[in-house]
Image (cartoon, rainbow, N blue to C red):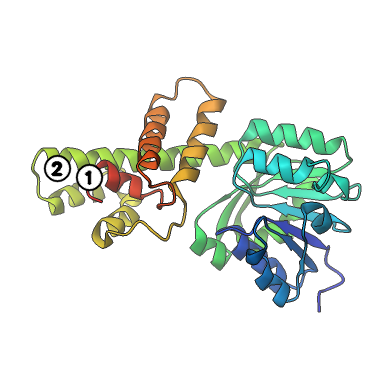
């Protein structure tokens, strides 16, 4: 039975990351309602005691907290503001929306302002980490918003995040900004390793030597998952899809001028996606750039 002393929660978006995050909420004893565009991903939660809603509006009705884990800014806008089935059509005044999606600071501030028109609270709280940390409850969480809203959200954020890595980094939008900085370094590092691998091949160096040079370089910490893809020849299942990396680099480019390296990494992503690798793990980009996959 759910713990009646805990707030009622709706969790919207049960993809690779959202599903394990929502599972922590259910396991912790919260009264949980879930929604996903494809209902089959929600059904396992229903079998374990959650309410499965047909629309975001139905999921949010009577809930004190609504958590979003969606792929794009447009998906967030649709789930929240659809005039027939959006969260704002049923959410009670004072409901806190925790947005764990990666949508960028401009979109986060826009969403917060629109929610405020409905007397709803907003905290942008994107996460850094892949499926394994989400499952283990050890993600890093960058939160942006009011301190009181953060304290209200902290018990939930600490379910899927490492409590020592759940931080309020500033006002609304700064959590999303911090996430973009981190993902920019991820994308450009992957692309840089790809070019290093390709240069090694062009110079006819032994692959083991090239690997050891990269491992000893400033990019060495990013190399093990790339090397694992090289050795296995498998870019799936993906912890973080290449299409999502491209989306995040697009968000970076929309927020700042003169990001030449980011632009080059984004174009490398686009070429790989055009070749049919959208659902591959993002780290496979380096292997593809080197012609090793």
Seen at 83% across and 57% down, the residue is 58
For the residue carrying disc 1, how many other residues have a C-alpha within 10 Å: few (<14), some (14-19), or many (20+)? few
Seen at 63% across and 49% down, the residue is 70
Q: How many marks?
A: 2
Q: Are marks 2 and 1 in contact (CB under 8 Å)?
A: yes
Q: Position of residue 242 (x, y in %)?
A: 43, 46
Point out the image quarter for the N terminus. Answer: bottom right
Seen at 77% across and 44% down, the residue is 80
Q: Residue furthest bottom?
A: 1
| Res 152 seen here | no
Q: Position of residue 275 (x, y in %)?
A: 35, 42
Determine the CA span between mark 2 and mark 1. 9 Å
Q: Which residue lies under the disc numbered 2?
A: 201
- Does residue 113 lie above or below 47 as drawn? above
Q: Secondary structure at mark 2?
A: helix
Between circles 2 and 1, the one closer to the viewer is 1
Q: Which residue lies under the disc numbered 1?
A: 291
- Does residue 193 lie above or below 129 as drawn? above
In this view, the residue in front, 198 or 57, is 57
Whichever of labels 2 and 1 marks the residue nearer the N terminus, that label is 2
């Amino acid at each position: 039975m759910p713990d009646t002393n805990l707030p009622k929660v709706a969790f919207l978006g049960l993809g690779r990351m959202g599903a394990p995050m929502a599972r922590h909420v259910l396991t912790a004893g919260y009264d949980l309602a879930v929604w996903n565009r494809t209902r089959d991903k929600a059904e396992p939660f229903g079998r374990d005691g959650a309410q499965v809603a047909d629309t975001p509006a139905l999921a949010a009705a009577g809930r004190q907290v609504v958590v979003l884990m969606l792929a794009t800014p447009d998906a967030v806008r649709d789930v929240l503001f659809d005039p027939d089935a959006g969260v704002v059509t049923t959410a009670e005044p004072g409901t806190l929306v925790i947005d764990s999606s990666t949508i960028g600071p401009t979109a986060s501030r826009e969403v917060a302002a629109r929610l405020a028109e409905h007397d709803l609270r907003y905290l942008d709280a994107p996460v850094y980490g892949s499926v394994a940390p989400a499952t283990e409850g050890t993600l890093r969480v960058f939160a942006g918003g009011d301190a009181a809203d953060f304290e209200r959200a902290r018990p939930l954020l600490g379910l899927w995040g490492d409590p020592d890595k759940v931080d309020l980094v500033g006002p609304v939008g700064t959590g999303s900004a911090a996430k973009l900085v981190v993902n920019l370094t991820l994308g450009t590092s992957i692309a840089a390793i790809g070019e290093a691998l390709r240069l090694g091949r062009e110079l006819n160096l032994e692959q083991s030597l090239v690997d050891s040079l990269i491992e000893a370089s400033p990019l060495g910490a990013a190399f093990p998952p790339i090397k694992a893809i090289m050795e296995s020849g498998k870019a799936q299942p993906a912890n973080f899809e290449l299409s999502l990396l491209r989306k995040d680099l697009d968000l970076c480019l929309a927020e700042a001028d003169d990001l030449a390296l980011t632009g080059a990494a984004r174009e490398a992503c686009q070429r790989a996606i055009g070749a049919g690798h959208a659902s591959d793990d993002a780290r496979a980009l380096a292997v593809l750039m080197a012609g090793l996959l």
